Amino acid sequence: MSGVNKVILVGRLGANPEIKTVGSGQSVARLNIATSENWVGKDGQKQERTEWHRVVVWGRQAENCAKHLSKGRQVYVEGRLQTRQWEDPQGNKRYSTEIVANTVQFLGAGAGAERGSQAGSDDINADFGPEPSFDAAEEIPF
């Protein structure tokens, strides 16, 4: 039986998307998304914890993210976890776990965005279906 590897996030961008083109000509964007959780501690004080998530978006969806998203914008992301391994210049093994998105929906206006400037076009928020094909061995340039 296969396992399930699915991530769903709703959070805000901590920075503008970074977009690059890999050797195959495919666009890839990296998003840094913050999610926060609030609760009241035993002492009655309000507590908050923020988690940061690295999200990788491929193809046309990456281009749309770079074009329409900016720091502070709220987004909905669906994808899967993926861990990459590499060796740093000193020969140490390094690991990075990120979310490979197959759906990104733009929510609400970002911090500082003009009123009424929300992207409402259906093709911008559309689920672009399965992840575009790319060489999994190809290095993500971030």
Image (cartoon, helix red, strand yellow):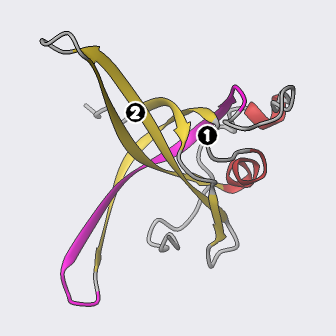
Position of 114 with respect to 110 (left or right) is: right
Q: Which mark is residue 6?
A: 2
The number of numbered discs placed on residues in the rendered structure image is 2
Position of 26 with respect to 120 (left or right) is: left
Q: Position of residue 137 (x, y in %)?
A: 44, 71
Question: For residue 20, which quarter of the picture?
Answer: bottom right
**What secondary structure is marked by label 1?**
loop
Position of 86 with respect to 109 (left or right) is: left
* Residue denoted by label 1: 72
Question: For residue 51, which quarter of the picture?
Answer: top left
Q: Position of residue 21 (x, y in %)?
A: 66, 71
Q: Which mark is residue 9?
A: none
What amino acid does circle 2 point to? Lys
Residue 134 vs residue 36, the one in the foreground: 36
Residue under the image location 20 percent in, 9 percent down: 44
* Residue 100 part of the magenta-drawn span: yes
Position of residue 68 relative to residue 74, above or below, is below
Q: Position of residue 132 (x, y in %)?
A: 63, 53
Whole-angstrom CA distance, mark 2 to mark 1, is 24 Å
Residue under the image location 68 percent in, 47 percent down: 70
